[in-house]
Image (cartoon, coloured by chain):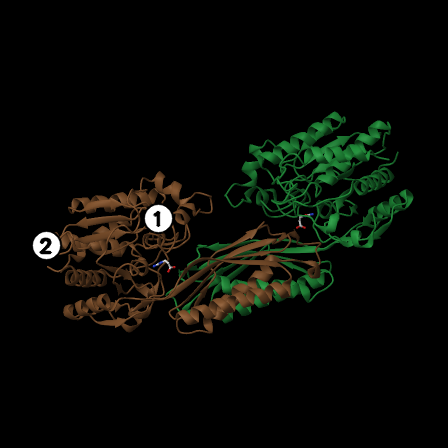
Chain colours: A green, B brown
């Protein structure tokens, strides 16, 4: 069994870096704070006897040798970047749970057959740079290193520049790093486990996701003298699409999701009719067919709105991954470990994307969910119970040992 | 008759300060660029033999003595601050037309009975700081100097600090400056004159305006795992109100106006359900009764939306002035001058607020409109014809001479 208090202490220490007044964490990918967080975790990894490799997209792999180092490592990990209003657990838990597994193996002087690795992947959150889950995406070849390097934040800074600046542009070619199996422990980020009063969520699949940038172009003009009938109000036309995004998701329950999370107006002045509105669209479903239907309905609605309004509207897909069912061997290992440890459990489909879905393209993968308070994440008040985090980490330990061999 | 070429040259020179790539001007109130613009105009005023007074809110009065300096001055003016996407003419025309009137009187060695003054008022646009028409508003006592000083831009800088910083926090107590009559020449900022192919708009009245800040508070949560039915999506609720603002205006034609020009989301991340949305509401009408009805309907809709959605919604009125009919003497002087000069003309209700409505609380006031291209202003492509600007300035000269006496 792992040391729950030590795991909790590591989580709290890492959460100091970028700590917000409301008790959350703001540590956006590839900022100075991300660098500090990375340095701290790498230091802990080295202190636990692990060797460290960084690849060209800044993914970090910390390795504990096995008896047979020719075997591909059994890997676990997640990310340490956060949302602008992020919490202490999203991502960070998966990385530090991996560290705690290694510390426990050290304490117990257990040598595994295959090596064990703890990874953290660059820019999982996708809030400073798109595509989301960038590091694991490049690693598995979902998109190219060049695409990732060229991504820019709203200030125009690129991933390539920022990686170099914080000293995490490594040498290793992404993906040239074998994986035997991949496990990721994570807070659920939804309300299902808490509602059902279960400790461990076994994750059969992750919903597919489709992200878009939509730009509506009207004509900025004075809010006073311009008669209503002569306006080309980009915001008014945008609100119809914003409402339809939610309506589409509501037509495909229970797993349909539709969100407009980001909006920018131009020129954004209270007595100017908005001339241009740019906003994001996030559509999800666990069924690929339904996600495609949602995509088609959204495009058809935009087309109709373009015709009805006479305004120019562009929609560009900026991220996409299909729903990802996990490997029966890894799902089975998690289920078995949970049963052996006697924790209450249920299956939970993940609504959030995770690095595990990209790792799953290269190796058998599985995930372990633990409850978080009120199902809330991507919020500074995100919270989780120490005993639940400990339970998830015990399941991780047992599942990894089963796959690595002792 | 005034010198149209000289007027045009002055407009083009002032438009260099804050010139944008698209041919517009961005010279927000109390910025370094505003300071440069003020210095240029004050320099021109001094060179034309005028004395200069600055009051505590930064309004600038440039005075040409009359034969009888005990008489209150016949004043004209406008503003030189611009929108973020402003043009070369809005405001600037009224100030430089006043300067051109004085230059012409100098050329023709005409001495007036009453003094002549050219004013420019601080922060007319209201886009960096609210309330709008701040300088003239403080001058006429619509709100206090303290209120104005305390107004802050989105970066937290206050009017008081910024006035001092650019060196335009004067000594004179606002309002302690007599006015005999006030005229303001301005581009129409709407399409009416151009449509009717008329050169001079006589302005019987200005629409009343009501501005609000609306804040909808939901709960930010992850866009993936949070089921649609459990969301408190502040943006979705906001879009209903945004649409209603336009619907209300459409119910009260032809002078009803409703605009949402400014929107800010929190946290504004594409995979976070918006937890808070702040947006502006701008309602206008030329009838005070209808403007009140629009106000009441908006509040009632917000109340209903609050009940239906269960989200917290606050609405705060941040600016208000009632419709302003101008003084028959000044409207008559403009009408008479236009007829004497032989320009085509019609009456045009102003949809935009102007410093003249606040001056009208202290003295008889009137306005002169000239056409602008496609009725567009608050846009970098705002444009006006030199011959129209010249015609408006001639009307201004004659109307002022009638009131000042020769
Ligand atoms: N787990 C997580 O928050 N991932 C970010 C990508 C997403 O929006 O699902
Ligand atoms: N003339 C003008 O643009 N005034 C600004 C105040 C308003 O929005 O009407």
User: Does dot 1 land on a helix, a strand or a loop?
Assistant: loop
Q: Is residue A94 left or right of residue B325?
A: right
Nearest to N terminus: mark 2 or mark 1: 1
Q: Nearer the viewer, residue B205 or A196?
A: B205
Is residue A238 among the parts visible in the rendering?
yes
The label shown at residue A52 is: none
Question: Callout 1: few (<14), some (14-19), or many (20+) C-alpha neighbours within 10 Å?
Answer: many
Q: Which residue is mark 1?
A: B27
Which residue appears farthest toward the left when viewing the image? B109
Identify the image quadrant of the N terminus of chain A.
top right
Q: Nearer the viewer, residue A214 or B287?
A: B287
Is B245 located above or below residue B97 in the figure? Answer: below
Question: Callout 2: few (<14), some (14-19), or many (20+) C-alpha neighbours within 10 Å?
Answer: some
Is A3 located above or below residue B379 in the figure? Answer: above
Q: Is residue B50 left or right of residue B158?
A: left
Is B319 located above or below residue A15 in the figure? Answer: below
User: Does dot 2 land on a helix, a strand or a loop?
Assistant: loop
């Amino acid at each position: 069994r792992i040391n729950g208090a030590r795991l909790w202490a590591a989580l709290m220490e890492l959460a100091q870096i970028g700590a917000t007044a409301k008790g959350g964490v703001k540590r956006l990918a590839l900022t100075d704070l991300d660098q500090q967080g990375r340095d701290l975790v790498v230091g802990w990894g080295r202190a636990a006897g692990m060797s460290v490799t960084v690849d060209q997209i800044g993914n970090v792999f910390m390795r504990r040798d096995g008896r047979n180092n020719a075997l591909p490592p059994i890997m676990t990990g997640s990310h340490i970047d956060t949302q602008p209003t992020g919490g202490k657990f999203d991502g960070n838990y998966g990385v530090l749970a991996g560290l705690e597994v290694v510390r426990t193996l050290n304490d117990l002087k257990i040598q595994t057959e295959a090596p064990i690795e703890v990874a953290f992947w660059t820019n999982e959150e996708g809030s400073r740079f798109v595509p989301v889950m960038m590091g694991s995406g490049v690693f598995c070849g979902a998109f190219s290193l060049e695409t990732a390097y060229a991504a820019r934040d709203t200030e125009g800074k690129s991933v390539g520049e920022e990686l170099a600046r914080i000293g995490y542009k490594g040498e290793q070619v992404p993906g040239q790093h074998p994986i035997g199996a991949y496990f990721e422990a994570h807070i659920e980020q939804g309300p299902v486990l808490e509602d059902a009063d279960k400790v461990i969520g076994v994750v059969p699949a992750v919903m597919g996701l489709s992200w878009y940038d939509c730009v509506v172009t009207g004509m900025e003009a004075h809010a006073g003298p311009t008669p209503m009938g002569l306006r080309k109000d980009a915001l008014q036309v945008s609100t119809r699409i914003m409402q339809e995004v939610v309506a589409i998701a509501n037509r495909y329950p229970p797993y349909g999701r539709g969100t407009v999370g980001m909006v920018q107006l131009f020129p954004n002045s209270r007595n100017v009719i908005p001339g241009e509105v740019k906003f994001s669209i996030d559509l999800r479903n666990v069924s690929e067919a339904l996600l495609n239907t949602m995509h088609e309905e959204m495009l058809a609605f935009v087309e109709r709105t373009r015709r009805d309004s006479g305004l120019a509207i562009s929609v560009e897909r900026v991220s996409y991954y299909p729903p990802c069912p996990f490997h029966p061997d890894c799902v089975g290992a998690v289920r078995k470990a949970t049963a052996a440890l006697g924790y209450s459990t249920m299956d939970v489909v993940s609504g959030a994307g995770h690095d595990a879905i990209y790792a799953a393209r290269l190796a058998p993968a599985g995930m372990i969910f633990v409850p978080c308070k009120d199902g809330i994440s991507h919020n500074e008040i995100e919270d989780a119970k120490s005993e639940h985090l400990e339970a998830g980490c015990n399941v991780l330990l047992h599942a990894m040992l089963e796959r690595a061999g002792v």
